[in-house]
Image (spheres, rainbow, N blue to C red):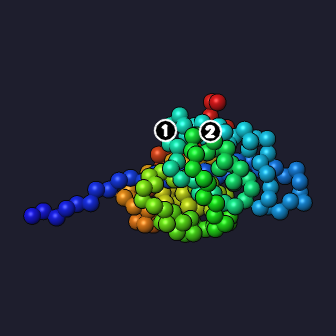
Amino acid sequence: MQPTRRAVTMKTLLILRHAKSSWKQPELADHDRPLAKRGRRDGPRMGRLLLREHLAPDAILTSTARRAQDTAALVAEHCGHDEPLQIHSALYEADPSTIIDLLRELDDQVDRVMVVGHNPELERLLEQLTGRCERLPTAALVHLQLNISGWRDLDFGVEAALMQLWRPRQLAD
C-alpha cells in the first residue's frame, strides 16, 4: 500500500502598504494621521485592481493606524470584500516575524489574505519571504503565492513566488 500524499494547495498573500497619508495636521500622532487626497484616490484604485485581477481577499488584516485602516476599508469596498476587517495593533510597527505569527493563526479556509501595514516592515517581510529587495511606495501591492497547504506551515523557509508587484503610479486607471 502506498502512503497517502497530502495535496499541497497554494495560499495567496497580498501585501499592501497603506496609501499616502496627510501631514497637514502636524499635531496629530503618527498613529492618527488620515489619508491625503492621493491616498483617498489610490485606495479605491488598488481595490479595483484586485477585482479585475480576480484577487479579492478572503480576509484583510490591517494595522490599527488610521491611514492603514482607511486604506483597507477603501480597498475592501472597491474589490467587493464584505467581511469585517481584522484590526491588529501588532501590525503597527510589526517586524516580519510578528506578521508571520499573525498569519499562522488564520483559518485554513482562508485561501487569500491581504495584510495592510507599514514600511520598512513590509519591505523586510517581502525580502525575507522571497529573497527580493523591492521598494514599496505608498499603496504598493504585492501578490505572493505560498507553497503551503495551511497557514500554520508558513515560515521564512517556505517557497514564496512573487507573482506581481503593482505601484499606483504605474497603473493606467
Give the number of the mark in front: 2 or 1: 2
The one nearer the camera, 134 or 81, is 81
Q: Position of residue 108 (x, y in %)?
A: 42, 59
Q: Residue furthest front?
A: 83
Position above or below: 23 against 1: above
**Residue appearing at x 79%, y 41% in the figure:** 37
Mark 2, secondary structure of its residue: helix
Q: Position of residue 10 (x, y in %)?
A: 38, 52
The residue under label 2 is 78
Does any portion of residue 60 appear in the rendered image? Answer: yes
Give left or right: position of 41 versus 75.
right
First-in-chain label (2 vs 1): 1
Alpha carbon separation for disc pair 2 and 1: 12 Å
Q: Position of residue 31 (x, y in %)?
A: 77, 61
Neighbor class of circle 1 (other Cα within 10 Å; few <14, some 14-19, many 20+) is: few
**Residue appearing at x 57%, y 44% in the figure:** 81
Q: Position of residue 93 (x, y in %)?
A: 68, 66
Placement of the C terminus among the 4 image quadrants: top right
Disc number for residue 135: none
The one nearer the camera, 101 or 134, is 101
Q: Residue furthest left?
A: 1
**Residue appearing at x 64%, y 68% in the figure:** 90
Mark 1, secondary structure of its residue: loop
**Residue appearing at x 73%, y 53% in the figure:** 67
The residue under label 1 is 54
Does any portion of residue 138 appear in the rendered image? Answer: no
Kind of residue at badge 1:
His
Q: Quadrant of residue 74?
A: top right
Kind of residue at badge 2:
His
Placement of the N terminus among the 4 image quadrants: bottom left
Neighbor class of circle 2 (other Cα within 10 Å; few <14, some 14-19, many 20+) is: some
